[in-house]
Image (cartoon, grey):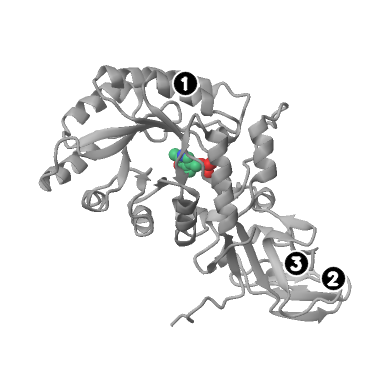
């Protein structure tokens, strides 16, 4: 039995005021050229849909995107009227749930059209009554209709009369490199493919592409131009930036666009990951700390024990290589990170005591640890850091300006 309220001291505080203001800021950066589709994959990038969906609805969000049908059902329970896109397609056995709960799958293979159309007709749905979005592969070779397959796919659409193509999307693969020519090549191919879709007599209403990086570097006017040419509305799909993290650009742009400097100044991290010191011990010079003795005290030290480990999503590779915040100061992680426990060196921190708050991600005093700091230390990206904070860490809503 769980206690009625989460009592675990290792927890993630989710600031709904920050989420609200990030959504409004991103909306204003995209407007008036493009609307927003709020990306909520992987339980809102680890922040928890139960907390994030109501906050985003309050901020004005009307369209959400998730990866799977199960994620979409969780969002539907919180947002009865929203448009919910399922980016990951549709698999055998999922069409009924998609139809019953009015979910909008993104499709790109003829067999996907067939299973949804057959399920819709089995329910006597009217012609063209089931909205779907289709994804075009404009260069990433991951998912989407490849240019050479488009004619075949369009024929398959005509053999699926219950479906109506409401939206068309693609995904940009180099939006974080503002000097790459990849994006303009993808736009050219997209333009040609949209022409073929119109020639086939289809009239999709919305064109969407672009993640946080594209939005923040100001792609909205270019997207709007292409969408207007094909008589569509435009939308952008931010994820990471909603949660208050500005993506890293590589190479760093020499001329920082206004929208990027605004984002850097005004996006506020939504998640704060914290724990409390469970116990403190004094160890003599020569004492070993943790598995395999990867740390040996060179002098008498104070070691604080934290009830957080790699099973919570704290990367094991950070052992002896990262520091956490306590009393506004950095305390190095010493020894290996265990499944449930981590040890930090608090020798240099005055007045430290059991129960003191320790920050894994977030501000404290004049300092701050970001998900991007974790990513740099761990050779990965902030998306992975946030989404791997495990289900064992309770998420608690807070609303602080
Ligand atoms: C995850 C995802 C996004 C959001 O990307 P961010 O970089 O987190 O803003 C947008 N579009 C698609 C197709 C995605 O899978």
Q: Which residue is mark 2?
A: 349
Label 2 with label 1: CB-CB less than 8 Å: no
Calculate the distance from the C-alpha at mark 2 to the C-alpha at mark 3: 15 Å
- Mark number displayed over residue 178: none
Q: Which residue is mark 1?
A: 225
Question: Which mark's residue is nearer the viewer, 2 or 1?
Answer: 1
**Side (left or right) of 102 relative to 253:** left
Image quarter (top left, top right, bottom left or bottom right) of the N terminus: bottom left
Q: In which quarter of the view is residue 77 placed?
A: bottom left
Q: Is residue 304 left or right of residue 190?
A: right
Q: Earlier in the sequence, mark 2 or mark 1?
A: 1
Left or right of 368 on screen, residue 105? left
Q: Is residue 170 visible?
A: no
Mark 3 or 1: in front is 1
Looking at the rendered structure, the secondary structure element under dot 1 is helix
Point out the frontmost of discs 2 and 3: 2
Label 3 belongs to which residue? Answer: 334
Q: Residues within 10 Å of mark 2 (few under 14, many from 20)?
A: some
Whether residue 320 is visible, yes or no, is yes
- What is the C-alpha distance between the residues marked 3 and 1? 54 Å
Q: Residue at x 17, y 34 (%)?
A: 160
Q: Residue at x 61, y 30 (%)?
A: 177
Mark 2 or mark 3: whose residue is earlier in sequence = 3
Tell me the residue at 70%/43% (across/down).
265
Mark 3 packing: few (<14 Cα in 10 Å), some, or many (20+)?
many
Ligand 1 is within 8 Å of the C-beta of the residue at disc 2: no
**Helix, strand or loop status at disc 2:** loop
Foreground of the two, 110 or 36? 36
Answer few, some or many: residues within 10 Å of disc 1's Cα (few below 14, many 20 plus, some between 14 and 19): some
How far separated are the C-alphas under marks 2 and 1? 57 Å
Task: Count the marks.
Answer: 3
User: Counting residues from the N terminus, which is met first, the one under dot 3 or under dot 1?
Assistant: 1
């Amino acid at each position: 039995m769980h206690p009625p309220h989460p009592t675990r001291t290792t927890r993630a505080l989710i600031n709904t005021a920050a989420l609200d203001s990030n959504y409004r800021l991103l909306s204003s950066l995209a407007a008036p050229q493009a609307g927003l589709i709020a990306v909520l994959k992987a339980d809102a990038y680890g922040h928890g849909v139960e907390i994030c969906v109501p906050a985003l609805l309050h901020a004005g969000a009307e369209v959400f995107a998730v990866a799977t049908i199960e994620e979409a059902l969780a969002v539907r329970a919180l947002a009865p009227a929203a448009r919910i896109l399922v980016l990951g397609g549709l698999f055998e056995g999922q069409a009924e749930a998609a139809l019953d709960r009015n979910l909008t799958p993104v499709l790109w293979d003829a067999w996907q059209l067939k299973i949804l159309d057959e399920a819709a007709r089995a329910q006597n749905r009217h012609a063209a009554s089931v909205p779907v979005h289709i994804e075009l592969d404009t260069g990433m070779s991951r998912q989407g209709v490849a240019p050479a397959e488009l004619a075949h796919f369009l024929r398959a659409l005509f053999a699926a009369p219950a479906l109506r193509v409401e939206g068309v999307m693609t995904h940009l693969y180099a939006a974080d490199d503002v000097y790459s020519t990849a994006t303009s090549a993808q736009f050219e191919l997209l333009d040609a493919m949209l022409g073929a879709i119109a020639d086939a007599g289809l009239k999709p209403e919305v064109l969407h592409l672009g993640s946080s990086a594209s939005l923040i570097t100001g792609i909205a006017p270019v997207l709007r131009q292409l969408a207007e040419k094909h008589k569509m509305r435009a939308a952008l799909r931010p994820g990471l930036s909603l949660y208050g993290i500005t993506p890293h650009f590589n190479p760093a742009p020499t001329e920082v666009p206004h929208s990027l400097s605004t984002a850097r100044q005004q996006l506020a991290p939504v998640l704060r990951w914290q724990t409390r010191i469970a116990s403190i011990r004094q160890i003599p010079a020569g004492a070993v700390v943790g598995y395999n003795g990867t740390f040996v005290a060179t002098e008498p030290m104070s070691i604080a024990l934290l009830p957080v480990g790699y099973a919570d999503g704290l990367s094991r590779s950070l052992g002896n290589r990262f520091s956490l915040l306590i009393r506004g100061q950095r305390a190095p992680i010493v020894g290996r990170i265990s499944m449930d426990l981590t040890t930090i060196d608090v020798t240099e921190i005055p007045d430290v005591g059991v129960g003191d708050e320790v920050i894994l991600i977030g501000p404290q005093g004049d300092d701050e640890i970001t998900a991007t700091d974790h990513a740099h230390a761990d050779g990965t990206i902030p998306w992975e850091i946030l989404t791997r904070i495990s289900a064992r860490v309770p998420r608690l809503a807070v609303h602080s300006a």
